[in-house]
Amino acid sequence: MARILLADDDDDMVEICSRLLPRRGHEVILARDGADAVAKAQECRPDIILMDMRMPESAGGQVNDRAGIEATRQIKTIPEIAGIPVLALTGHMMSKFKENIAEVGCVGMVPKPIEDFGALLALIDRHLGPSSPP
């Protein structure tokens, strides 16, 4: 079983992942904004992070296209959690946005809306490695 931090403000995404990931034996930890994602990553030390790139920076804040990038950047500067793989969840598939995601240390990108949940599970499994079986 893996601990997965899902940082997303989209209710549908939260519902789907909260229902389907535990069926694969994973524990889901929720964060609804960038600041909460950084705090939960430090507190819970997940095995992998699914980070929405477009969400509020903080509770009650406006949705921001760079909130997930900034949260990932912060996570990667904290030595105790910098090694946690981060998968970017995004509806933006432009090449410049892909470059920004890679530059901050995301190991992969998942297009939203998720049409193939099996592909997401395979990507998660690939980045968990052999020491964290699902």
Image (cartoon, grey):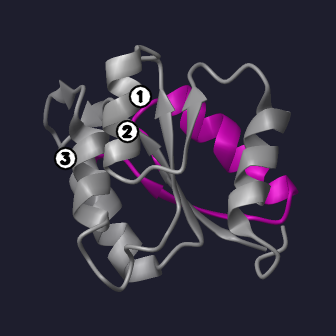
Residue 15 in the magenta stretch? The answer is yes
| Residue 15 in which image quadrant | top right
Question: Which range is magenta?
Answer: 7-33
Asked whether the viewer can see residue 20, the reply is no
Left/right of residue 86 with respect to residue 120 in the rendered view = left
> What residue does disc 2 label?
101
| Residue that protrudes farthest toward the top in the picture | 94
Front-most of residues 18 and 68: 68
Q: Quadrant of the N terminus?
A: bottom right
Report if residue 54 is visible in the image.
yes
Q: N-terminal of the two: label 2 or label 3?
A: 3
Element under label 3?
A: loop
| 19 sits left or right of 50 in the view | right
The three-letter code of the residue at mark 3 reads Ala
Of all residues, the one furthest to the left in this rendering is 61
Q: CA distance from mark 2 to mark 3?
A: 23 Å
Q: On screen, 41 above or below 61? A: below
1 and 3 marks in contact (CB < 8 Å): no
Residue holding disc 3: 59
Query: Looking at the rendering, in which quadrant would you find the C terminus?
Result: bottom right
Q: Are marks 1 and 2 in contact (CB under 8 Å)?
A: yes
Residue 41 position (above or below residue 53): below
Give the percent coordinates (x, y) of residue 42: 34, 78
